[in-house]
Amino acid sequence: MTTPSAPPAAVARPRIVALPGDGIGPEVVASALQVLHAVGDFEVDEHPIGAAAIDRTGQPLPRKTLAACARADAVLLGAVGTGTQNDDPEAPRPEQGVLELRKALGLYANLRPVRPFPALGDAGPLKPERTKGVDLIVVRELTGGLYFGPRARAADEAYDTCTYTVAEIERVTRVACELASRTGRRARVTSVDKANVLDTSRLWRDTVTRVAAREYPQLALGHLLVDTAAMRLVTDPASFDVVLTENMFGDILSDETAAIAGSLGLLPSASLPGAPDPAGGVRGGLFEPVHGSAPDIAGRGHASPLGTVLSVALMLRHGLGRPEAADAVETAVERALDAGLRTPDLGGTATTDDTTRAVLAAL
Ligand code: NAD
Ligand code: IPM
Ligand code: MN
């Protein structure tokens, strides 16, 4: 078992830190907070992160923001980044804010569930018969690998280093195996790596194989190379149950799952310091949509807030120990889509506000 001690039961008035961030971040967080307030009594404090924080304090993750997140029962993040690149290696980058936050809070397990809404039918790029019945979850290692290894840039050379320790691989493997073992899942873990080329991937594969065989012999474990996995995710998504992978591969593959869901705007995520408590206790964590700050549509009021609203559902279920409220939010989103709600990413004309209203009405 990965749960070191039983998490406490739900607290009466949870303290939530909201980090709106940049681009569409503030738009989707404002919507999701309305939904949160509709399902319970929460204390919500907003703090800057990303480019918004650099503008105010010079740092992408100000000390006060981090301290507030560390004290909070759960954190809700919009997105960071301006979509522009600054080549000065000394200049602070908005994306550092979210990376430092994940690392500082020890959130090594990033859960990115994908369950297409039946109402969306052929609104996405894949044929409905291909996405029918898909219920998969990407478990992405979040605090290791290329994102955090030694790096440097010189005038005409640069490098990033991918490092993983056995302990880092073991703990995220246990999270994936715990999830695959739960009621409602199909007891199948597909580990994704590039073991035909990378030493980190060979260590990954050996470690995953050993942990699964010793501790979870009842699970069916498979391995796929990441290039094949990328192809299989769109040709046969229903064959996956739990997809376990390292940081960079998980980032890329989870955006690809937008093709299964119908839009990137629909995908939520939970970043946790371990497996979710099977008894539904409080775990804390960071909850954010899979998408970024979408500078191309920011400020127009038509970003889909549903990925963030569904991240609130994950926060209620895995962070705050309120599974009934989580179910209510997910059902409300489903009903709103059943009733025909479509933002432009799904081929419609609904605005962010229309979406918020439709979800609140369905609650
Ligand atoms: P993106 O995810 O922001 O956008 C990709 C495409 O999807 C765009 O066309 C965008 O309009 C669309 N899209 C995204 N979210 C949407 C939504 N809610 N509703 C409708 N359409 C939506 O990726 P990008 O453009 O490559 O990156 C922009 C910035 O966001 C970069 O600075 C990147 O680093 C950052 N980013 C941040 C996070 C995060 O904070 N967790 C995640 C991904 C990217
Ligand atoms: C995500 C984002 C981040 C990541 C960026 C903004 C650092 O793409 O959360 O998927 O790569 O982890
Ligand atoms: Mn990403």
Image: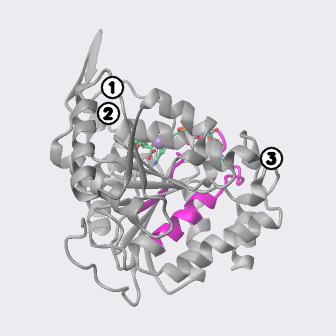
Dot 3 and dot 2 residues touching (CB under 8 Å): no
Q: Which residue is mark 1?
A: 88
Q: Quadrant of residue 336?
A: bottom right
Q: Amino acid at mark 3?
A: Gly
Q: Secondary structure at mark 2?
A: loop
Q: Which residue is mark 3?
A: 347
Please say which color scheme the image uses: one colour
Dot 2 and dot 1 residues touching (CB under 8 Å): yes
Residue 309 visible to the viewer: yes
Q: Position of residue 159 (x, y in %)?
A: 26, 20
- Of 266 and 151, nearer the camera is 266
Q: Marks 3 and 2, Cα distance to the nearest angstrom?
A: 39 Å
Q: Residue at x 79, y 66 (%)?
A: 338
Badge 3 or badge 2: first in the primary sequence = 2
Q: Which residues are magenta?
A: 286-315
Q: Amino acid at mark 1?
A: Asp
Q: Nearer the viewer, mark 3 or mark 2?
A: 3
